[in-house]
Amino acid sequence: MKEENWIRNTNKVQLWLEEEDRGAQGEAITISISLGNNCGDDTMRSTYWTAIRSIGSSFDDFPLARIGRESSLPLEVQTAVDSVKAKVKSAFAGIGEDDLILTVILPHGRTGGAYADMDALSSHFADKAGTAMVKAYKDGRWDGSMNGNVPAMTPPAVKTSEGGQEEE
């Protein structure tokens, strides 16, 4: 496995490991990541990656169990997006007052219903944060840089009542 792919994939897994204690399996994944980081060989990284995927496959929320298109963002930008999404999810999950929040914070009006639990609500807001960051990057309002844990991005221009955008 090429080093760039290793870094991209293991960054996602490390963020996932930080979300909650994964027990002995999490420790095995952490050790495999450490071994892969230090091996310096594409073939050995592939071997460690196979072990990580195999161990992680027993978890429903393992980040690389999904099939889909790889991100077109540069590695450092995607890493920043993933990191912020994990922090936003954790922040919303830890708000407390679950019953109150789930009663009054509802999905978009056309969706209807309510969030199933705080995990669903926190995932929604994490995805919303990620989408905002990717859009800011594509619009040229963010270059991927961070001020600590906060993306150094410019908000979109305010729309006028005529539907256009105000000049800054």
Image (cartoon, rainbow, N blue to C red):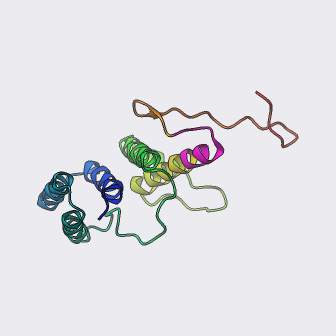
Q: Position of residue 140 (x, y in %)?
A: 63, 41
Task: Residue 61: name its quadrant.
Answer: bottom left
Magenta highlight on residue 95: no
In the figure, is residue 2 to the left or right of 151?
Answer: left
Residue drawn at x 21%, y 60% as measured from the top left: 41
Q: Is residue 135 magenta?
A: yes
Which residue is pictured at 30% across the width and 58% down the height?
Answer: 6
Residue at the extreme right of the image, as rendered = 162
Closer to the camera, 151 or 91?
Answer: 151
- Where on the picture, by quarter, is residue 57? bottom left
Residue lying furthest front: 41
Q: Say above or below: 136 vs 54.
A: above
Q: Nearer the viewer, residue 148 or 87?
A: 148
User: Going by the image, does 73 lie left or right of 161?
Assistant: left
167 w.r.t. 134: above or below: above
Q: Residue at x 11, y 59 (%)?
A: 24
* Quadrant housing the C terminus: top right
Instruction: Count the marks.
Output: 0
Hey, which quadrant is residue 13 in on the image?
bottom left
72 with respect to 61 (left or right):
right
Q: Which residues are magenta?
A: 133-143
Check the picture and name the quadrant holding the N terminus. Answer: bottom left
Provide residue 3's location: percent of width, then percent of height.
30, 56
Which of these two is toward me, 12 or 34? 34
Residue 162, image x and y in percent? 88, 40
Chief SS of the magenta region = helix
* Residue at image coords 84%, 43%: 163
Residue 76: give x, y in percent of width and height. 42, 45
